[in-house]
Amino acid sequence: MSFTTLGLSAPILDTIAEQGYDKPSPIQLQAIPAVLNGSDLMAAAQTGTGKTAAFTLPILEILSKGQRAQANQARVLILTPTRELAAQVAASVETYGKKLPLTSTVVFGGVKINPQMIKLRRGIDVLVATPGRLLDLYNQNAVRFKHLEILVLDEADRMLDMGFIHDIRKIISFLPKQRQNLMFSATFSDEIRKLAKGMVYNPVEISVSPRNTTASTVKQWICPVDKKKKPALLLQLIVDNQWDQVLVFTKTKHGANRLTRYLEEGGIRAAAIHGNKSQAARTKALANFKKGMVQILVATDIAARGLDIDQLPQVVNFDLPNVAEDYIHRIGRTGRAGSTGQAVSLVAADEFKLLSDIEMLIKQILVRESVDGFEPVHVLPQSRLRPVRANKPKKPKRSKIGHTDGQRSGENSRGHKPAGKNKKQAGSYYKTRNKSSVRSR
Ligand code: ADP
Ligand code: MG
């Protein structure tokens, strides 16, 4: 199946070809015709499956056929939870729409509001925004939605996690009742479905991967280690494995700063990205990381959400996340678009509960591999997948203990599945896209 049969016109198809996309991803295959049809949509897909293009391409197609935006009006509103994600989606809109006479802009907090007001004055076809700044602009009469055609909620699950529910409801109350609604999310929780009820009408539902499974192309393992020794272990792993581009997650902003300083003292070029940093500092750190000028980017969950860094080879969980689902989001930063990635978690004994929650969620026990000289004094208890309720019958052993099973079916000593053999999920269509065809940013 190629892009040409989906109902997109020549300028967009040309741009897609220039991007080196051979065929639509599964979510694109389903979402593009549905959006072009005018349907509302609820789509769930794991990160890195091409959700942004799945909504942007048909939106651009629809907009290219209608009337240009009038003063202070927006025709499409795309809401995202974070500034970084907003900037990224806006960049995609610009890229995919570069052969069309449409306007787009992005607004988010942390930077001056005046230039944003000026940009909105003439009207904007596609407005990408974070909820808080959008409300500010609305309250100052800088933007109106009289002619709004389409509303998109990207990473809707994260918006709820971040407490944007009231802002979203308020924004929706400003919008015309007659509009198309598209809701995208990595997973669909019950809360999301509740929000959807008041927002989408008779939606086409698309789900391209089973809930709560991790990307098939990511090799995952854990290093048991004492808390105190985590920084030294990380440094050693970076040096021994010659990792040259690593995204490291810490639980706190403070922890991110401390670790960054430690790595810098160890001669490693590192930068931190989190909510206390100015927008300019965050943008610069990310740009330097993408360019390879910064080797290690240390991030908190909120800052890292949705970042699309092509071919990121390595993710490290310096701390395990408090919320098990964040583990899936974190390791979704690697192994994107079919490239293989590695995700290692440094786990101290007091994180055992968090580890168990993650293993329950992903339904697999993570392979453990201690590093010489870093064997923990405080022993990490053995994992096992507990049944959810004590009275439920146990599942067959085969499906539970990933690594013992894997050893037999030809995994390497770490228990990682060779990427090429894994036929599950989104991987297959992306395989045609090799390293050399990836555009640089
Ligand atoms: P998601 O929002 O699902 O996390 P993105 O839309 O950010 O995913 O896309 C992830 C990566 O895949 C991006 O680098 C994008 O350029 C690339 N991509 C998107 N669609 C395709 C496609 N059809 N073929 C190849 N690469 C694609
Ligand atoms: Mg996305």
Image (cartoon, rainbow, N blue to C red):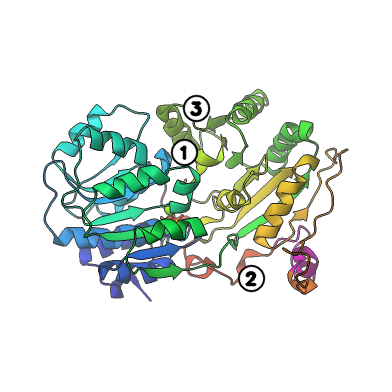
Q: Quadrant of residue 299?
A: top right
Mark 3, secondary structure of its residue: loop
**For residue 276, which numbered disc appears in the image?**
3
Indicate whether 69 appears above or below 407.
Answer: above
Q: Earlier in the sequence, mark 1 or mark 2?
A: 1
Mark 1, secondary structure of its residue: helix
What amino acid is found at the position of numbered circle 3 in the picture?
Answer: Asn
Indicate whether 8 appears above or below 55.
Answer: below
Measuring 23% from the left and 27% from the top, which residue is drawn there? 114
Q: Position of residue 331 (x, y in %)?
A: 59, 51
Q: Which residue is mark 2?
A: 421
Check residue 402 for magenta coloring.
Answer: yes
Q: Position of residue 34 (x, y in %)?
A: 31, 70
Q: Position of residue 256 (x, y in %)?
A: 60, 31
Check residue 382 for magenta coloring.
Answer: no
Indicate whether 235 appears above or below 53.
Answer: above
What's the CA distance linking mark 1 and mark 2? 31 Å
Q: Earlier in the sequence, mark 3 or mark 1?
A: 3
Front residue of 165/412: it is 165
Residue 244 in view of the camera: no
Magenta span: 400-416
Indicate left or right for 45 with 408 as reference: left
What amino acid is found at the position of numbered circle 1 in the picture?
Answer: Lys
Measuring 79% from the left and 67% from the top, which residue is drawn there? 407
Front: mark 3 or 1:
3
Q: Which residue is mark 1?
A: 291
